[in-house]
Amino acid sequence: MNKNLFRISSLILLVILMNGCIRGYTPDIVLKKDGQPCISIPPDEDFFRRQKEFNILGLDIFQTGVGELWSRHYLDSKDHYYVKNQQCLYFNYKFQTNILYDIGFFSTEKRG
């Protein structure tokens, strides 16, 4: 009985640890003075609210009903793109009002 409980507890702990490493989050979005959005990783992503640096792997902009409008990927690039939480992501795209956009990005936390 104790052996099965240990196995189940170990499995649950493993699942919790794996979900802690790979997670989605909702970015902060505010309008800048020029009317363009500032999309950033929120500070509450970290329990201790530390300033963290993220390696941006890809940025994508889609228009609802149209498809992809713009994308940039840094995964295989020699240029790396790093941002800190609460720092605006740079999209080289002029957003327009009254258009629905789907915006996505992939990132990993920069280590060491």
Image (spheres, rainbow, N blue to C red):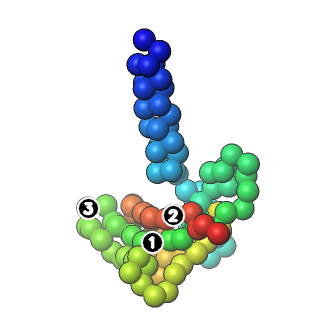
Q: Where residue 47 appears, x then y in whole percent?
A: 69, 46
* Image quadrant in which the C terminus is located: bottom right
Task: Say above or below: 29 vs 34.
Answer: above
User: Identity of the amino acid at label 1?
Assistant: Leu
Q: Which comes sooner in the sequence, label 3 or label 2?
A: 3
Residue at mark 2? 108
- Distance in Å between CA atoms under marks 1 and 2: 8 Å
Q: Is residue 10 left or right of residue 83?
A: left
Check if mark 1's residue and mark 2's residue have beta carbons within 8 Å: yes
Name the N-terminal-most of marks 1 and 2. Answer: 1
Q: Dot 1 lies on which element?
A: strand
Mark 3: secondary structure: loop
Q: Nearer the viewer, residue 53 or 21?
A: 21
Between circles 1 and 3, the one closer to the viewer is 1
Q: CA distance from mark 3 to mark 2?
A: 29 Å
- Asked whether the residues under the numbered discs 3 and 2 touch, taking CB atoms below 8 Å apart as contact, a structural biologist would say no
Q: Earlier in the sequence, mark 1 or mark 3?
A: 1
Residue at left 30%, top 71%? 68
In the picture, the disc for residue 57 is 1
Question: Which residue is depicted at the point 73% across and 56% down?
Answer: 50
Up-down: is 47 above or below 5? below
